[in-house]
Image (cartoon, grey):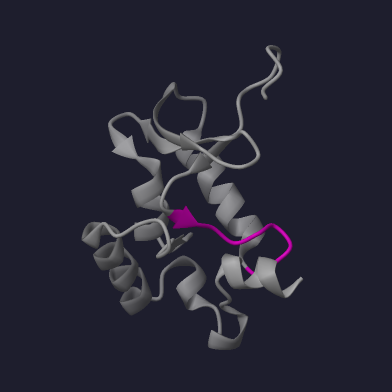
């Protein structure tokens, strides 16, 4: 559970961003930090994961950060948990435009879920 003195841990619903130790991980983290900035966020809580983290959609200035991360090529749509066709369309656009992680050589593009299982 969260300590009352620190911000709650939030897992962005429906997306899978690169781990910090994998290709494009640092860039994805920096993109998320820029998207959040110092703005007030609204969290639409969907669930809690096995570690007690909130799973939800994060909104900043009316923009869904989860969707934006996929749309800008900073994360994959998490197929196992997200069947929203808008996220799939956003990912395809990012792929076709070689945005974000899609600009990496194919051999460096590993889904984070696969990366975690390979370790």
Instruction: Tell which of 3 and 47 is nearer to you.
Output: 47
Is 43 covered by the magenta stretch?
Answer: no
Q: Is residue 3 left or right of residue 29?
A: right
Q: Is residue 79 left or right of residue 87?
A: right
Is 17 covered by the magenta stretch?
Answer: yes
Instruction: Tell which of 73 and 19 is nearer to you.
Output: 19
Q: Main secondary structure of the magenta part?
A: loop
Q: Residue at x 68, y 12 (%)?
A: 4
Q: Residue at x 29, y 66 (%)?
A: 88
Q: Residue at x 53, y 86 (%)?
A: 106
Instruction: Tell which of 9 and 1 is nearer to you.
Output: 1
Instruction: Tell which of 31 and 54 is nearer to you.
Output: 54
Residue 55 image point, x, y percent: 48, 38
Q: Residue 91 lies in what quarter of the image?
A: bottom left
Q: Is residue 77 above or below residue 4?
A: below
Residue 105 image point, x, y percent: 56, 85
Residue 30 image point, x, y percent: 59, 48
Residue 45 image point, x, y percent: 41, 30
Q: Is residue 67 above or below residue 88?
A: above
Q: Residue furthest top?
A: 4
Q: Residue at x 69, y 19 (%)?
A: 6
Q: Residue 24 lies in what quarter of the image?
A: bottom right
Q: Which residues are magenta?
A: 15-23
Q: Residue 112 lies in what quarter of the image?
A: bottom right
Check the picture and name the quadrant holding the N terminus: top right
Q: Is residue 105 above or below residue 34?
A: below
Q: Residue furthest front?
A: 50
Q: Is residue 28 left or right of residue 57?
A: right
Q: Is residue 115 left or right of residue 39?
A: right
Check the picture and name the quadrant holding the C terminus: bottom right
């Amino acid at each position: 559970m969260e300590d009352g003195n620190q911000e709650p841990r939030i897992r962005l619903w429906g997306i899978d961003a690169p781990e910090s130790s994998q290709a494009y991980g640092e860039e994805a983290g920096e993109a998320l930090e820029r998207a959040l900035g110092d703005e007030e966020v609204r969290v639409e809580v969907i669930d809690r994961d096995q570690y007690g983290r909130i799973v939800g959609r994060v909104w900043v200035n009316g923009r869904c950060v989860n969707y934006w991360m996929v749309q800008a090529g900073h994360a994959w749509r998490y197929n196992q948990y997200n069947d929203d066709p808008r996220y799939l369309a956003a990912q395809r656009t990012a792929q076709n435009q070689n945005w974000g992680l899609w600009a990496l050589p194919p051999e460096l593009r590993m889904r984070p879920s696969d990366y975690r299982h390979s370790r």
